[in-house]
Structure formats: structure tokens, C-alpha cells
Image (spheres, rainbow, N blue to C red):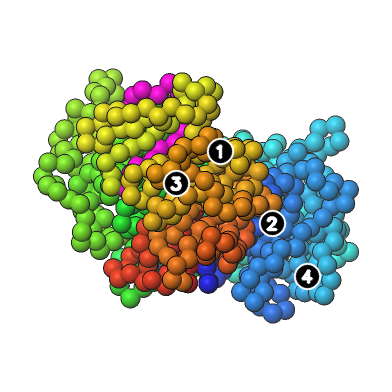
Amino acid sequence: MYVRNCYISSNCNQTPTAADCSSFNKIAYGSCNSVLIYDPQYGSGGKVVHTLIGHTKRVNSVRWLRGRDMYGYPQDLVSGGTDGNVIVWVHQDKKYYPVFLKDNHYPDIFSVNIVDGYYKDQQTVICSVSMNEYSLRIWRKELGKEFHLQHRLAFGLTTNPTFCVGLRMCIYPKQNNLIIACALDNSKVEILIEKSDNTWNTIDKLSGHDDWVRGLDFCELGNGDLLLASCSQDSFIRLWRLTTLVNNEIKIYLESVLAGHEGWVYSVNWNLETKHLLSASIDKTMIIWEFDKASGLWLEKVRVGEVGGNTLGFYGGFFSPTSDEIIAYSYHGAFHIWSKNINNVWDPAVTLGGHFDEVIDISWEPKGEFLYSVSNDQTTRIHAPWQKPNREITWHEIARPQVHGYGLSSIAVISRNKFAAGAEEKIIRIFDAPETFVKNLKRLCNLDDIESNNLTFIPKGASVPSLGLSNKAVFTNDNIDDILPVDNKNPYPEESHFVAQILTEPPTEETLLQNTLWPETQKLYGHGYEIFSLAASPDGKYLASACKSTKASHAAIFIWDTSDWKQLQSLISHNLTVVQMQFSPDSKSTTNKETSIHTRIIWTCAWTHDSKYFATGSREGKLVLWIRNSGKESVPPLGEVSKVSEPLDFPDSVTAVAFAPGFIYELSYLVAVGFEKGTIEILKITNLQFEKVYQLDNELAHHLTVKKLVFRPRFGKAGFKEENQKLLQLASCSSDTSVRIYNISL
């Protein structure tokens, strides 16, 4: 058996230096406690190709090491996290190995907010800043030796310390010395240079900005001078020229002030080939600045950004190495790419997306063609495969049916074009696919058997009123005025207008936010507290729901008829919250186990494909296999079920379990088990005996709790019409904000 990642979906962390682009066009970014490496050129539309596990808390800053060593341009990077660790990731044999940098005087006190690194000759220099430490730490590594802490430089006076909010390293070419620019909370930029004896001196403190300086970047000019760009919360960008006088003294003077943004500017990045400057701001725009030789001024050449939607602008932006793409990530961690076409027009390009908070639940579409996910980030998302001609299939987010006001807790897929969602509210909401989704899905995923019925009578899309939580159906573009309120004082209110779009490639973030919503067709009431779990029968006829509860009267499971949405029955048995439910594949039974075998909370349950057995997993690390004793007398406390084997004990809490959609190796069941520590084990059950066949470690699986595991309901890969009995796909979601799909080769 062989398992590999097919798809990793997770957004960038919400920090200003959480992502960086390398000289070989790979994007490294912090995602929860991990570092992901994203290749935008992979296959049809890019893919995360590496997961780096080393931090135990949020990754705040990621930088590729610049410069070159004796072997050329290496592919190493450095990261800093809230856990106080600075890690250099050394690339060797197509893998990354962590090297932890230690400060024995302050081993684990400070959160690392900013890091940077540079190669100089045969040495590697790493610097890091902790905002609450008021100092800059510099490590050095010489060829064949280990890293050692070289300096700890304090900012400001002891009685009035300042902390650093921006950092950048470079080589000053005229003296071949390292130089560091540090942006301080007093709105000044302190410039440090390394002397021949490896000491560091402050050569200047640049004043001019009226607020915190958030971004810095150096550019080497042809005459050996350096140009430093600094951007600030005062919305201005300042360019400083570093040059050398006759007496070898470094002189710094203001070259220009760039005004074009209307909000905080978080990032500046130089294109070292064209000498263009890219700035990214919280005002939802990015600007490419170009020096005009005729006027001697820096002028705005290109402006791109987000239009509409509930977004909060950009945290960072950078050029690709080939200069024909610009990449940005927004406040909520979504990536944006603009690519320059043959007419020198910058067009939005395909990129990856993902949740920016804990992913609670996932579910395959009944035929396994695409995947739904819900998260605490208040969104429901649809992930599907997409292929360019003669390119490898890649997975992308193709729709965002629900953008809610509460964290979402569960999802139940009733049919390909209908699902139910539960959130931190008492209402269950039912959504139906609009015409635009049905047509775009057919076009993007090449599906011929879409349940379309009569598209004439279904909505074009949906839109959300400014003060509402319900997605209202839009049948034509003309009735949008009936949904959005008229404001006589402001005739052009900032609303989320729906515009039907014909997609030939996965949508951009702006399109996902505004034009892929599904209309809400039904609300189900009855529960007394927030909805916690949902389950739909495989035939789509029934929906089961449960809410948070502390007593039996509220722990009842409601069964709904999906044809008329009437409540059929209330199942009263539990005393506390029902955390997970699943109908048997024959749609005749549902599991929500109460036994005397488990001693702690039962987190998960799942049926075998033939409805003969089901399994339960619990907090104390037990996995138990059960069988229905049909026709036998009910014996408390187990009733008409009994365990068929001794419990399988694990050292970690079992939080997710799923069975494959059919037998493998003739008559063996395959079960995937997810754990609280983020790993996944795959077991084979033959003659009711468990056998471990594969383990997915934290790099291949997750680094925080596995919340849900679901096998694709058919053998083979999504995106291919033919089935492959030697291949399965397993989807997982986790508290680490990621959704993953694995290809399992039998």
C-alpha cells in the first residue's frame, strides 16, 4: 500500500510576513503551526507540495534565505513562531530538515514575530525579532559548523525600550558587508551594518514616517548603491538611497515619497530585474511603481486588487522570479495571483484557497465527484478537481455556497445539489444549487450526469442582504433590487451584488465571495440549543440532527423527511450531546453509540459498506467493532448489538473513523482512524482481526486534531470517469485549518 497527498487546502496565517516567494518560484507560507510550500506551476493550477512540521504554535514569519553559498542558490528557508522557535529548514535530497536555533539565555519565553536570513560567502546569517523582547538576535553558521548565537542587540534605552515591527537583510555591495534595516515602533528605521570584526554598528536612524513602518525591502542599483523601500501605517512609501562618500562613509538620504494608497501599507517588494516596486495595502489594492526617467518621478504603473465582498485588504505581496506574475495574500489568508498577458494586461490567475479557522466537518457528494467542507471561519466550501489540456489534475475551491455569521459545526449532503448545514445557532439551513453552479460544475469538472432537472425554474444564484444571514435567491439580474435595500442617503451602498459568471477555470477569491452563493430554501426549527451534528441517509430521504445538550430532553435526535421537511420522529436515548451520527449504507439504521465498553466520550462512529458492522472511537483511545444482532432479544445496556472483537487500544484519543466503500484484498475491510495528535492510521480487518497496514505521520496527515475522515464513496479518483479497484481516495479535515485528500494505492 502507498499513500500520497492529492490535495492540501489551507490558507495563510494572518500575519504580515507569513509568506514569501523564492527565486525558483515556490511560495512558502505559515499555515497554523506548519509551513507549507506551494508550487503555482504544478499541474493545471498549482499545488502544495511540502508540509514542514516543527513549530508547536502559530507560525508568524517565513522567509526564503537570499544570497548564494559556495554551491549556488540553495532552497533553504527560515521560520519563526509563537512557540519562540526559530527554525532553519535545510533542503537536501528533495526533503526539508529542521535545524532549531537556540538562545540559552532565553530558551522559550518569547514569541518570534519576524525572521530573515542571508548567505554571505561561506556563512549563513539568520536574524529574528520578538516584539516583547525589545532586541534583535543574530545567529551565524560557518561552513561545516553549527549555528551559534552571535549577537543580541537591544533597541532603544533601558528606560524606554522600543520593539521592532519590520526587518530586512541585504549585502551592501560597495563594502561587501551585511546590512540590516529594522523598523521600530517609534516610526523610525534603524540601519545596522556589520564590521570586519563581526560587530554591528548603527549607522543611521531614518525619520519621516508618522506611524509604524510595517514593510522593508532592499534593491541593488547598477552603480553599487542600495535603494531601501519602507512602507508605513501612515499610507506612504518612502525610498531611501544608501551610497558611499569619498571617505568610505555610508550616506543615506531620502530619494522619494510615494503616495497612492488610502490605508495602511503592509508590504513592499522590489523586482530586482526591472527595478519596479510592488506595494500591498489594507485598502484592498496593490500598486506597481516605476521610475519615469523623463520626469524623474516614481509613478504608478499598474494597480490591481479586490473589488467588493467582505474583505479587509492585503497583508503581503511579491513578484514572481520571472516578473510576469504578482502574488498577494489577504487578511483572511487567501492567495491572489495576477499574470501579465501578451498585451501587458494583468489578469487574475488560478490559485489555491482554504479555510482560515478550524475545519469541523467534511462530506463527499453522493457520487464522489467533489467535496464539501464547513469551518469555524463561518463558510461552507466546495472543492473539486480541474484539468487543463495535457496537464495533471489539480484540486481547487470552486464554490462557497454559504458565508455565514456564525461558526459552522456540521454538514449533511442530501443530494448532489442539496445540503443541510448547522452552525452555532438553533436553526438547520437547507441550500439548493443555483443554475450558475450546475453549469459551471459541468464545464469545469466535465460531468455529464449532473442532476439538472429543469434549469428554467431554479435560481440563477443568491445574494445576502447587508443585515441578514439568509442567502436570498436571484432568478434574474433584474430582481437584485428586491433583495438589496435602497439607501436614499447613499445611492451606491457597498453591497454583495450577484453577477452570473461563465467560468472556464476555478474562480478567484472575489468571485467565490460574491457570485458562488447558494440560495437558502428551507429553515428547520425545533432544537433548543446550537446544532452540533447532522447526518443524511444515503438515499437522501432522511435527515438526522442533534444539538448541544446537558440533559436528556435536549439530547434527542430529530429525524426529518426531506420531501416535505416535516419532523418524523424524535429519538430520545442520550443524556448529553450527540457528537456524531451516521446512517448505515442501506439507510435503515443510524449510529450514535451508548455503551459500557467506552469509559470516556465517544467522538466518532462509522458503518462498513455492507451495513453489517460499525465502529466507535473514544477519548480514551479505544476503537471497538460492533455487529447488529437482528432478531435477538434486546439485552441492556447494549441492546441489539454486541462487540465482535476486543477493543483496539491506541496511545492517543480516537477522534475520527471511516470505512472504505468496498472490500479490499477479496474479503477484508479497510478502516482509517484519525487521532487527536493529527496522525492517521489505516487498518485492515480480516476475519474480525485488526492489522495495521499504513501510518500517515504529521507531515503527510495533520498536526492538530483530526476532526473527520471520509472515504470517497467509489473506488478510483475523482475527475476520472472510469473506476480503479486498486485506488481509493480519503478526505480528512482538522483543527489545523486544512482539508486534505489522499490517494491510497492498494
The image's mark for residue 56 is none
Residue picked out by circle 2? 54
Magenta span covers which residues? 523-538
Would residue 535 be counted in the magenta stretch? yes
Reading the chain from its start, which is encountered first: label 4 or label 1?
Answer: 4
Between marks 4 and 2, how big is the CA–CA gap? 24 Å
Marks 4 and 3 in Cβ contact (< 8 Å): no
Q: Nearer the viewer, residue 402 or 364?
A: 364
Q: Is disc 2 surrounded by few (<14), some (14 to 19) or many (20+) residues within 10 Å?
A: many
Would residue 278 be counted in the magenta stretch? no
Marks 4 and 1 in Cβ contact (< 8 Å): no
Q: Secondary structure at mark 1?
A: loop
Q: Is residue 601 above or below residue 717?
A: above
Residue picked out by circle 3? 629
Residue picked out by circle 1? 595
In this rendering, position of residue 364 left or right of residue 169: left
Reading the chain from its start, which is encountered first: label 2 or label 3?
Answer: 2
Q: Which is more foreground, mark 4 or mark 1?
A: 1
Q: Which is more foreground, mark 4 or mark 2?
A: 2
Residue picked out by circle 4? 123
Using the rendered view, name the quadrant where residue 187 is placed.
top right
Q: Which is more foreground, mark 4 or mark 3?
A: 3
Callout 4 amino acid = Gln
